[in-house]
Amino acid sequence: MLVHEKERQLTPSDVTSSEEHEAVNDRFEAIVEHLRREWQLYLMLLPMIIWFIVFLYKPMYGLQIAFKDYSIFRGIAGSPWVGLEHFETLFANDQFLRAIKNTVTISALNLLFGFPAPIILALMFNEVLNASYKRTAQTIVYLPHFISSVIIAGIVITAFSPTAGIVNTVISWFGLDPIYFLTQPEWFRPIFIGTGIWQEAGFGSIVFLAAIAGVNPSLYESAVVDGANRWQMMWKITIPSILPTILIMLIIRIGNIMEVSFELVILLYQPATYETADVVNTWIYRQGLQSGQYDLAAAAGLFNAVVAFVLVMTANTLSRRFSRTSLW
């Protein structure tokens, strides 16, 4: 019996199992040693992890009211399930369909005009040789990013005022009648897109300036030897070198295509411009907080999130397939 047990301890499977067990122990000890050595870094990371859990993951529990007839008296758990009834209500609602159309239109225009703006600005700053002028210009264009959306909206409303706004003052110099820009639906989108570019283009150019700073200087030196001018160096060296950064930023932008700047829209729009200004987020705000239809608003928010997820996955896949650049 003892001989049999001794032979069993020497089988290859037992030896392999023992080696795997030792390897697991070694990895565990290495992790513990790493945590003990770098505990200060993980301690600094802790507030961000708590923030994510409290404000991003915990609220996901409430998403289930999109499939319930929610009652604040019964609570989330006590409210009855209604399946996809709220989604059917959404897609039968003309105002919600109009909000989707406005969101996609504004986001497409913002992508068309707003996305290239910081790239062009970064390329222009890269060509400025006077350091003091460059710093002053950068400070001026970065500044609007740090101003509250409320103040930005106040400046825009004042500038386009029909009585004392600078825009209508200039128009009156040419003998034309003042225009009530912010009460006419056809003017909302140009004003909103222009305001967004003014506020964010300067700050957004920082990413592309950092990418330009990483371009190998020997490429420019070789181009100078070959007789290339600044314009040719920009097209043949700078832009191709920062193309991966441009694609990454484009993927991120596409992922946020359903997230039109809520604060700015709600500060600039009014019932007279709902036709072109009402977006999904403002519709959710009115239904959820003003009308108290939390379940319907949750269904709209969930739809918004699913569309954004599909868009960012598609953009990332296409980018990886055609340019070998992707977020993951």
Image: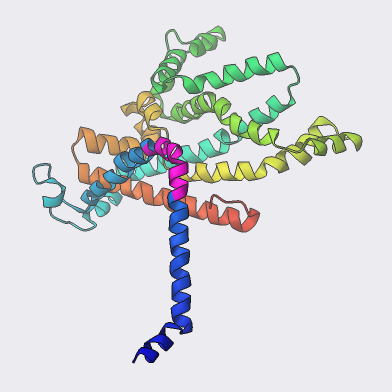
- Res 257 seen here: no
Quadrant housing the N terminus: bottom left
In the image, what residue occupies the spot 44% across and 46% down? 35
- Look at the magenta stretch and give its main secondary structure: helix
Q: Residue 304: percent from the left, percent from the top? A: 36, 46
Give, as a single range, the part of the protein colored magenta: 33-46
Q: In the figure, is residue 222 to the left or right of 90?
A: right
Position in image of residue 260 (x %, y %):
42, 36
Q: Residue 125, percent across and down?
A: 68, 25
At horizontal 46% and vertical 66% (from top left) the residue drawn is 22
Q: Is 28 situated left or right of 288 in this image?
A: right
Residue 259 location, quadrant:
top left
Residue at the spot 38% in from the left edge and 44% down from the top edge = 100
User: Residue shown at 37%/87% (left/top)?
Assistant: 5
From this viewpoint, is residue 155 visible? yes
Q: Is residue 93 above or below residue 174?
A: below
